[in-house]
Amino acid sequence: MKFAITYSNGEVFQHFGQTREFKVFDSETKESMIVGSGEYSHGGLATLLQEIGVSALICGGIGDGARRMLNGNGIKVYSGNKGNVDEIAEAFMSDKLDENNVSTCHHDHECHCH
């Protein structure tokens, strides 16, 4: 299973729609890689993650629209996380993270929600 974590300088990036990098993990091989988001934002990020075979996203803040797009692409969302990406990945692979359905951004915009 592949999963992605919003990434910035080794920490969980806190605004999904403005993510410039993801750290993508393969839970079977235990390998990981950094994937740039390029020109994608918000809805396009859901497509990017689906194209690279991700089935779960771990992030900080995320809005309802992005959550719906990710879920519509078959990607489970684990939001409200912060801290070291590798430690969060280890917790996820140990079944210690709960799927969180609470959106932390509630309006349409180009903001810097945390």
Image (cartoon, rainbow, N blue to C red):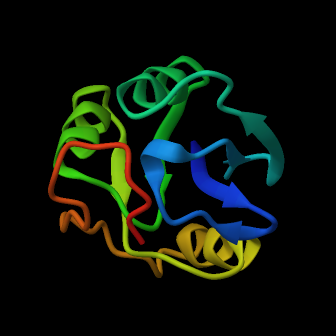
Give residue 94's quadrant in the image: bottom right
x 84%, y 48%: residue = 31
Residue depicted at x 70% and y 44%: 21
- The percent coordinates of residue 81 (x first, y second) are 47, 76
x, y percent for residue 35: 75, 35
Q: Is residue 28 above or below residue 61?
A: above
- Which residue is painted at 46% across and 51% down in the image? 16
Instruction: Please determine whether, in this image, residue 113 is positioned above or below residue 63.
Output: below
Looking at the image, which is closer to me, 95 or 37?
37
Count numbered badges in the picture.
0
Q: Quadrant of the image for the C terminus?
A: bottom left
> Residue at image x 65%, y 31%?
37
- Look at the image and tell me in which quarter the N terminus lies: top right
Indicate whether 106 appears above or below 34: below
From the top left corner, tell me how far across and down residue 8 is, in percent: 73, 60
Observer-nearest residue: 84 or 92? 84
Q: Quadrant of residue 30?
A: bottom right
Q: Position of residue 98 (x, y in %)?
A: 34, 74
Indicate left or right for 12 with 49 as reference. right
